[in-house]
């Protein structure tokens, strides 16, 4: 594979973005299956919460003006006219010197403007004796106090979490508008790559990349299609690309040899158009990016740690964008706990472990699989840096599990 000119990381990101139209389509989904989906429009509350004046404790609904004279030495007597439990409807209006018992969460009857705590009362026959007065609105949650009808509750592009599902249920929504799930096709290439359920013959390697990438994307709510392993031929790789032609993104990891990478390049050019032909970064120099219509094709390095790094720093930003999620890579500054050497002329992305305000490299070689198990972030070392010394500051991309 010849690299006539390597694009920088920044040039690569811009070229990909400029080549695509990021318009996500919407669909309706029941709230019961909305977890990990993304809102395609602002969520407007269809109701007030609460939609009735609600008692915030067990007590008696009263007119506050009837209680102003109440004290421990001079109690006020009010006639009890009904009991109102949560879920029931009041039958009587509260008039002068009357009250109704209200349970926590029960509707406060018309005419009452406050609730006296049961601890400040004594029941005597059909009346109660008050030893403390209340102010208007005391112990009552007014209509719309929590959420007002017509207010925007969540903005467009919000990820639906378990908490949001609970909110949707509390608003009585049966379905919501979300972006269509992103469809991602994934496969590995290489004669040395085998599936985890095959016998590990000498010289063979289990497929790590497809399973890591699929799991990460499924957690984000994407529909993933693991297409298995393509052997070393342009025809077989093109066949896999065609299997994934209905996907929005296709991700493949190339084999370790130069010949295997050449097959991937030829296959992408046959299936679509190659737009990135190598990147001036480490790891990931032989990375390929293509497109067909409005779908992206990423040809990642085959080594697990390299593939892990490139997937997180190159692919994930476009997954977020194409899924309709307004989210960017989170970058934070840390202190290096050791001297880290870099490759001049290329931007380095280094898997690191985070310990307080410091980071420690966990890189054990591109072919290692323990590196990304321990990685909590990816340190960025700029291209003209020979090394980062112990105690110097580093920018680190934070990783999610």
Image (tube, helix red, strand yellow):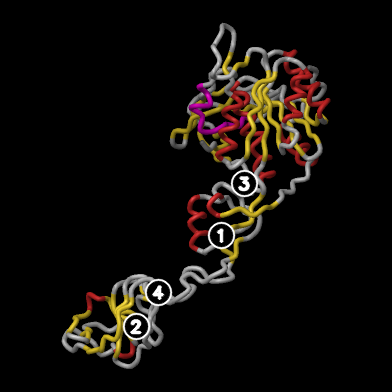
Distance between the Cα atoms at labels 4 and 2? 16 Å
Q: Nearer the viewer, mark 1 or mark 4?
A: 1
375 drawn magenta: yes
Is residue 340 found left or right of 248 in the rendered image? Answer: left
Distance between the Cα atoms at labels 3 and 2? 47 Å
Tell me the residue that label 3 is attached to: 327
Is residue 166 visible in the rendered structure shown here?
yes
User: Which region of the structure is painted magenta?
Assistant: 370-381
Residues tagged 1 and 4 counted as in contact (Cβ below 8 A):
no
Report the residue at 56% width, 15% height from top.
Answer: 198
Tell me the residue that label 4 is attached to: 54
**Chain-order first, disc 4 or disc 2:** 4
Tell me the residue that label 1 is attached to: 174
Report the residue at 66% width, 27% height from top.
Answer: 227
Is residue 220 found left or right of 289 in the rendered image? Answer: left
Secondary-structure class at tag 2: loop
Distance between the Cα atoms at labels 2 and 1? 39 Å
**Chain-order first, disc 1 or disc 4:** 4
Report the residue at 59% width, 48% height from top.
Answer: 37
Are there few (<14), some (14-19), or many (20+) residues within 10 Å of tag 2? some
Tell me the residue that label 2 is attached to: 135
């Amino acid at each position: 594979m010849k690299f006539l000119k390597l694009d920088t990381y920044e040039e690569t990101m811009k070229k990909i973005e400029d080549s695509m139209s990021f318009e996500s389509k919407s669909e309706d989904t029941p709230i019961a299956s909305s977890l990990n989906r993304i809102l395609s429009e602002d969520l407007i509350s269809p109701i007030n919460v609460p939609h009735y004046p609600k008692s915030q404790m067990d007590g008696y609904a009263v007119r506050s003006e009837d209680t102003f004279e109440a004290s421990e030495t001079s109690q006020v007597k009010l006639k009890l006219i009904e009991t109102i439990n949560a879920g029931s409807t009041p039958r009587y209006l509260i008039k002068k010197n009357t009250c109704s018992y209200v349970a926590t969460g029960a509707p406060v009857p018309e005419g009452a403007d406050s609730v006296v705590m049961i601890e400040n009362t004594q029941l005597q026959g059909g009346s109660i004796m008050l030893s403390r007065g209340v102010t208007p609105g005391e112990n009552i949650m007014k209509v719309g106090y929590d959420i007002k009808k017509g207010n925007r509750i969540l903005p467009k592009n919000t990820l639906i979490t378990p908490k949001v599902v609970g909110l949707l249920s509390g608003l009585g929504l049966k379905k919501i508008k979300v972006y269509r799930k992103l469809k991602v096709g994934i496969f590995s290439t290489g004669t040395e790559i085998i599936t985890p359920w095959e016998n590990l013959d000498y010289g063979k390697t289990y497929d790590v990349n497809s399973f890591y990438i699929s799991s990460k994307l499924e957690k984000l709510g994407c529909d993933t299609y693991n297409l298995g392993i393509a052997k070393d031929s342009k025809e077989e790789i093109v066949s896999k690309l065609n299997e994934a032609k209905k996907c929005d993104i296709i991700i493949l990891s190339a084999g370790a040899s130069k010949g295997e990478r050449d097959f991937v390049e030829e296959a992408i050019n046959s299936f679509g158009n190659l737009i990135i032909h190598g990147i001036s970064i480490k790891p990931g120099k032989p990375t390929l990016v293509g497109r067909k219509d409005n779908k992206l094709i990423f040809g990642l390095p085959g080594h697990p740690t390299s593939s892990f790094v490139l997937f997180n720093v190159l692919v994930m930003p476009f997954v977020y964008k194409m899924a309709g999620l307004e989210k960017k890579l989170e970058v934070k500054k840390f202190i290096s706990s050791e001297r880290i050497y870099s490759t001049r002329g290329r931007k380095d992305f280094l898997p690191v472990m985070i310990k307080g305000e410091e980071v420690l490299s966990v890189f054990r070689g591109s072919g290692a699989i323990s590196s990304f198990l321990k990685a909590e972030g990816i340190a960025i070392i700029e291209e003209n840096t020979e090394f980062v010394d112990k105690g110097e500051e580093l920018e680190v991309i934070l990783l999610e599990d």
